[in-house]
Image (tube, rainbow, N blue to C red):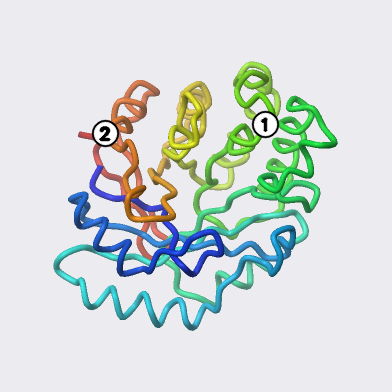
Amino acid sequence: MRADVHMHSVFSSDSDSEPEDMIVGALGKGLEMICFTDHYDKDNMDWGPEDIFAPEDYFRVLTSLKEKYRGRIDVRIGVELGIQPHLASYYSEFVKRHPFDFVIGSVHSVKKKDIAFGTLQKKYTDEEMYRMTFEETLRDIELDSSFDVLGHLDYVVRYGKEKEAQYSYKKYADLIDEILRALIAGGKGLELNMAGLKYGLSFAHPHPDVLRRYRELGGEVITVGADGHKPEHIAYDFYKAPDILKECGFRYYTEFKDREAVFKKIC
């Protein structure tokens, strides 16, 4: 894998890494391209101030670094939207106003509660929380066309009380199949997010059974990201990604530039 297209910097509230440090870290990993995808989680208030950045500052800083490192590494500018049903129109207008290379749509909140905050876990069983997350994910996709790729589809499993003990593709196949079909019908892709392994799961997001099903249904657009928030997490376990994808039936992975998909052969 030559590129990591999911990473965060100080423009995300959960990272204290300077963008230039992330670039230097990527160079140290031998990458040829990276894409910053800092959080833009409108109306997520569980952690205090909502997790958004000033787009003008974001583009000013990253564009300067893009020029500084031109010829050494291709720096692209993206965003990770925290999608929620009521934000579909807002995000549609937001991405039209800014020249992002790549837009990830991720479900971080369900019923307006941040999954990682712990509130939902106190009220619901893992099975209930996973099912309602997939239900809301489907609703998000049906309403929101602002993103290119759905991020870390089974992210919620990281935060279950028993994690993957209550999770399998088969158990939620009715909803997951609907999500995958909706993505394909809408021309949207799926992300292989390696951070599942970093957070102690036995799989990267989504589970290989989900990736395999996406491919069986005709899905082709698949990006690869480590979801790193510090330099040492860039390209995390990327040596495993080619085999994961090949075993699930993929011959190509995808990069985005100016919101256009570019297919790269998996080596």
Question: Given the current orientation, which residue lies at the most extreme right position?
Answer: 123
Per the image, label 1 sits on a secondary structure element best described as loop
In the structure shown, which secondary structural element does the residue marked by tag 2 occupy?
Answer: helix
Q: Residues within 10 Å of mark 1 (few under 14, many from 20)?
A: many
Residue displayed at 70% across by 41% down: 138
Pick the residue in front: 8 or 98. Answer: 8
**CB under 8 Å between callouts 1 and 2?**
no
Q: Nearer the viewer, residue 8 or 243?
A: 8
Three-letter code, disc 1: Gly
Residue 242 picture location, percent across and down:
29, 31
Residue receiving disc 2: 239
Where, quadrant-wise, is the N terminus in this rendering? top left
The alpha-carbon separation of the residues under discs 1 and 2 comes to 27 Å
Q: Position of residue 42 (x, y in %)?
A: 68, 65
Please report the residue visible at 64 percent of the width from the left and 62 percent of the height from the top. 41
How many numbered discs sit on the rendered protein? 2
The image shows residue 241 at horizontal and vertical percentages of: 33, 33
Circle 1 or circle 2, nearest the eye: 1
Q: Quadrant of residue 250?
A: top left
Residue drawn at point x = 63 percent, y = 16 percent: 170
| Image mark for residue 4 | none
What's the residue type where badge 2 is placed?
Tyr
Vertical comparison of 146 with 134: above or below = below
The residue that appears at 68% across and 23% down in the rendered structure is 172
Crowdedness near tag 2: few (<14), some (14–19) or many (≥20) residues, C-alpha within 10 Å: few
Q: Which corner quadrant of the image does residue 51 belong to?
A: bottom right
Residue matched to label 1: 160
